[in-house]
Image (cartoon, rainbow, N blue to C red):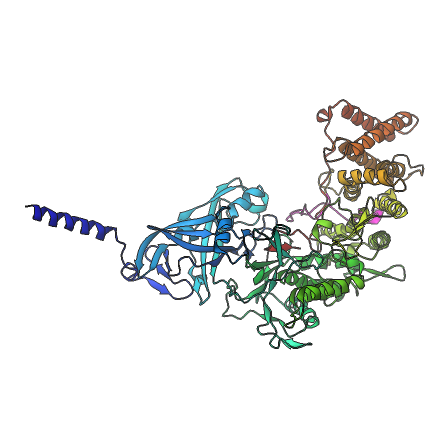
């Protein structure tokens, strides 16, 4: 009897164990479609699922998501082809589960001692991206359901929509599915694509303008799993002076006397076939970029030509034909990591172009370069040229100048964005050295001939600049065995310093409060003040010649305003450049012992000249539109939607507001001159050196040019502009006095000058015409309420929005330390 019970117990135990044992992969996947490749997978057509076979547990690989099909709104930023963040991951089995684990490569120990490495690994958190249940296994291979992982909103589209205040959305599983056309397997990479639908409510105007039904937003998201490169790549040390993007991590094996932070540059792998060649050598594997075949002509040829300019820089670094540009073959998948891609992307509005890269976080090696070029950008460049030189005549051919300028800009833009994907950041000081880099933001150079003719033939430079060759040389130069690489790289830097070249990037150029007088977006010339004076002459000629011939016959006259805006605000970027002279200082990314300028305030006389030139740009006679232009622009006609972002705001309803352009131009200048950080810097520099202007002198200059200007403004239109400007000045002074960002000294000076202005107005409000009395009493009321802390009961003037500028050529910011730069 006991024996019978024991046999029964063993049978039950065997049966239980058999039930707990997962089936074999072969049994489980019977009838499914298997795809061989880097990570073999099975397609279960009956259930719409992807089953991933994992044979290499605990082996690191690269994972990154991509937005394969975008939304089409520059403002939301979810563009076709946009790369997500890369992650090094590995699959680890824990009992019946498989975890997708990301180690923390930001903190590591570059040591041969495994215990030292383990101590660092155990000191900082890892990230587990997903957990999978083992569905089947065979001989060490496991099968997991990858579908839930693939169906997530991997690129954060819902968060992007929420962040831009375009609604609240979430993924909807019932309206999402695999997209098999771009789900593929290759020997070294596995690609999955999904059709993801977000559902939600509260869609904002940007989203509503690009989605057929705003309650459901459908896009394609792509997932890439890639074999990591071999260990034959040698990282190169980062130097802040070199003009190459860096990757930072912390090495806890560093000796106590050395910094923990280590930095490598990011670059493609490039090796010479003949490592001993002193001059040119072909590359073992050239860097090849492919252009989106959806790009039309003549744009296609311009982009190919501009991108190919980089071969000039690689030749200067010792390589023959190491950089190549081709059309993407019909058989190639643009999502495949093996193809560096220049993609032509459409949006509902003009927007940024950008260059991004997929980078090995361990070494800085660029694995894929991805350029996104906005298709509407060329139309904006054409619009600028149209305002400058167009003379549309019925039955007459259109001048080729406009298209030639547009294509010249596209060549430069193509080179610029490819440069980012080669590892180069912006260099905004290059414009002072005869346009020494395509990595600067170029404003079109418009020359004046015979005092009245505008010439566009030299609008943009052609070819790679001197600085670009320096940066590529530092990043990609191959040194023969026995040559000291560190010393050789330092010689490259010393060489460009001796040539008078320089490098300053985004943090020195983008903030309106930044201080370097030569570092700015879209400025020109070697001296910001001289160039502002010249640009103002170009602007005056363009406005004086502005007429109905700036648009083709048959176009609504209301569309003239879209051509007018970039002409009226033609000086907007050069004003910003000149403003940096005020309270400005020259400096470099100096290292100890390299002999560079460390920090030197701009000479007082030059600061004062800059202020005078800037203030001259807000004089009524400069801001007033020519009378013939005022008579040209009617309200928007039936059937046309006003493009409010590309035209001047208005307080006059449907009709063109003659004061709005002046308000826009003034609203560009005052935040620069009275910026809290600039104001604080002015007070600080005068405290150190009394020969330099302080904030009080700047405010006096502003008040003397406007409120206290003794030159009578008899023409009523110009007088109205002056009064408007004075109210805006008052508003910005009050704002500065209230600003928590300004230093106590700056706020005190702003308050002191407000009190001085109040006393002056109080004396001037009598004995003038009715309009001026109203103007003065309005100002006194505003100051009085400010002093009583009651500004909420009498709100500040609502400024009309200034028409969009950037990317009137290019322009935005560096997004991620490794992934992407925008222009």
Figure quadrant of residue 453 = bottom right
Secondary structure predominantly adopted by residues drawn in magenta: loop
Residue nearer the viewer, 58 or 823: 58
9 with respect to 213 (left or right) = left
Residue 771 x, y percent position in the rendering: 86, 30
| Residue at the image point whose x is 34% and y is 57% from the top | 143
Residue 225 x, y percent position in the rendering: 46, 59
258 with respect to 437 (left or right) = left
Residue 399 seen in the figure? no
Residue 642 seen in the figure? yes
Question: The C terminus is located in which quarter?
Answer: bottom right
Residue nearer the viewer, 380 or 730: 730
84 with respect to 564 (left or right) = left
671 with respect to 482 (left or right) = right
Q: Is residue 686 above or below residue 788?
A: below
Q: Is residue 329 above or below residue 177?
A: below
Q: Find the residue positioned furthest to the top.
A: 788
Figure quadrant of residue 187 = bottom left
Q: Read off the magenta span.
A: 625-648
Residue 100 x, y percent position in the rendering: 43, 52
Residue nearer the viewer, 554 or 351: 351
């Amino acid at each position: 009897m006991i024996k019978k019970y024991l046999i029964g117990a063993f049978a039950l135990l065997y049966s239980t164990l058999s039930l707990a044992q997962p089936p074999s992969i072969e049994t489980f996947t019977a009838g499914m479609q298997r795809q061989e490749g880097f990570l073999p997978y099975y397609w279960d057509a009956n259930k719409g699922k992807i089953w991933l076979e994992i044979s290499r547990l605990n082996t690191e690989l690269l994972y990154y998501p991509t937005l394969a099909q975008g939304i089409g709104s520059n403002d939301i930023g979810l563009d076709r082809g946009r790369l997500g963040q890369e992650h090094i991951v590995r699959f680890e089995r824990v009992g019946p589960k498989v975890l997708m684990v990301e180690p923390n490569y930001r903190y590591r120990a570059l040591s041969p001692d495994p215990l030292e490495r383990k101590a660092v690994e155990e000191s900082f958190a890892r990230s587990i991206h997903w957990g999978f249940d083992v569905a089947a296994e065979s001989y060490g291979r496991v099968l997991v359901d990858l579908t839930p992982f693939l169906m997530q909103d991997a690129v954060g589209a819902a968060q992007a929509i929420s962040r831009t205040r375009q609604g609240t959305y979430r993924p909807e599983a019932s309206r999402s599915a695999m997209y098999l056309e771009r789900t593929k397997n290759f020997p070294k990479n596995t690609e999955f694509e999904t059709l993801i639908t977000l559902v939600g409510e509260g869609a904002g105007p940007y989203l509503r303008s690009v989605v057929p039904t705003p309650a459901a937003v459908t896009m394609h998201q792509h997932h890439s799993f890639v074999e990591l490169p071999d260990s034959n790549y040698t990282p190169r040390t980062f130097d802040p002076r070199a003009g190459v993007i860096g990757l930072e991590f912390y090495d806890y094996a560093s000796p106590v006397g050395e910094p923990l932070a280590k930095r490598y540059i990011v670059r493609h792998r490039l090796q010479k076939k003949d490592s001993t060649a002193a001059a040119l050598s072909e590359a073992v594997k050239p860097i090849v970029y492919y252009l989106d075949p959806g790009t039309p002509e003549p744009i296609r040829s311009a982009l190919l030509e501009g991108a190919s300019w980089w071969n000039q820089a690689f030749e200067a670094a010792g390589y023959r034909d190491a950089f190549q540009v081709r059309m993407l073959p019909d058989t190639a998948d643009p999502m495949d990591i093996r193809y560096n891609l220049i993609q032509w992307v459409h949006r509902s509005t003009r927007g940024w172009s950008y260059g991004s890269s997929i980078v090995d976080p361990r070494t800085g090696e660029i694995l894929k370069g991805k350029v996104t070029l906005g298709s509407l950008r060329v139309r904006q460049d054409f619009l600028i040229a149209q305002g400058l030189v167009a003379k549309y005549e019925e039955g007459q051919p259109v001048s080729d100048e406009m298209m030639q300028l547009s294509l010249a800009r596209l060549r430069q833009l193509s080179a610029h964005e490819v440069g980012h994907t080669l590892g180069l950041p912006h260099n905004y000081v290059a414009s002072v050295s005869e346009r020494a880099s395509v990595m600067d933001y170029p404003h079109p150079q418009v020359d004046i001939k015979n005092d009245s003719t505008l010439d566009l033939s030299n609008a943009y430079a052609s070819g790679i600049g001197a600085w670009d060759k320096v940066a590529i040389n530092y990043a990609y130069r191959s040194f023969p065995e026995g040559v000291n690489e560190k010393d050789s790289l330092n010689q490259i830097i010393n060489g460009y310093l001796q040539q008078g070249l320089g490098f300053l990037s985004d943090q020195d150029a983008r903030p309106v409060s930044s201080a370097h007088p030569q570092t700015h977006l879209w400025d020109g010339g070697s001296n910001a003040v001289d160039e502002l004076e010249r640009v103002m002459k170009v602007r005056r000629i363009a406005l004086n010649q502005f007429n109905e011939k700036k648009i083709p016959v048959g176009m609504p006259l209301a569309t003239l305003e879209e051509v007018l805006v970039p002409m009226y605000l033609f000086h907007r970027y050069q004003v910003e450049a000149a403003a940096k002279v005020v309270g400005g200082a020259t400096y470099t990314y100096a290292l100890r012992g390299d002999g560079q300028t460390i920090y030197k305030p701009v000479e007082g006389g030059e600061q004062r000249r800059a202020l005078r030139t800037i203030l001259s740009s807000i004089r009524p006679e400069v801001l007033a539109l020519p009378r013939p232009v005022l008579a040209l622009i009617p309200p928007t006609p039936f059937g046309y939607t006003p493009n409010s972002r590309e035209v001047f705001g208005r307080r006059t309803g449907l009709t063109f507001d003659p004061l709005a352009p002046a308000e826009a131009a003034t609203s560009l200048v005052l935040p620069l001159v009275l910026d809290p950080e600039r104001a604080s810097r002015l007070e600080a520099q005068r405290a150190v050196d009394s020969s330099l202007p302080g904030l009080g002198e700047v405010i006096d200059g502003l008040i003397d040019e406007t409120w206290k200007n003794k030159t009578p403004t008899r023409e009523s239109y110009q007088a109205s502009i002056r009064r408007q400007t004075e109210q805006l000045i008052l508003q910005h002074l009050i704002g500065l006095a209230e600003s928590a960002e300004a230093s106590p000294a700056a706020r005190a000076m702003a308050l002191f000058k407000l009190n001085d202005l109040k006393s002056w107005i109080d004396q001037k409000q009598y004995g003038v015409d009715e309009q001026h009395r109203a103007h003065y009493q309005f100002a006194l009321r505003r100051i009085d309420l400010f002093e009583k802390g009651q500004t909420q009961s009498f709100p500040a003037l609502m400024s009309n929005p200034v028409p969009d500028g950037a990317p009137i050529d290019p322009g935005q910011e560096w997004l991620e330390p490794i992934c992407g730069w925008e222009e």
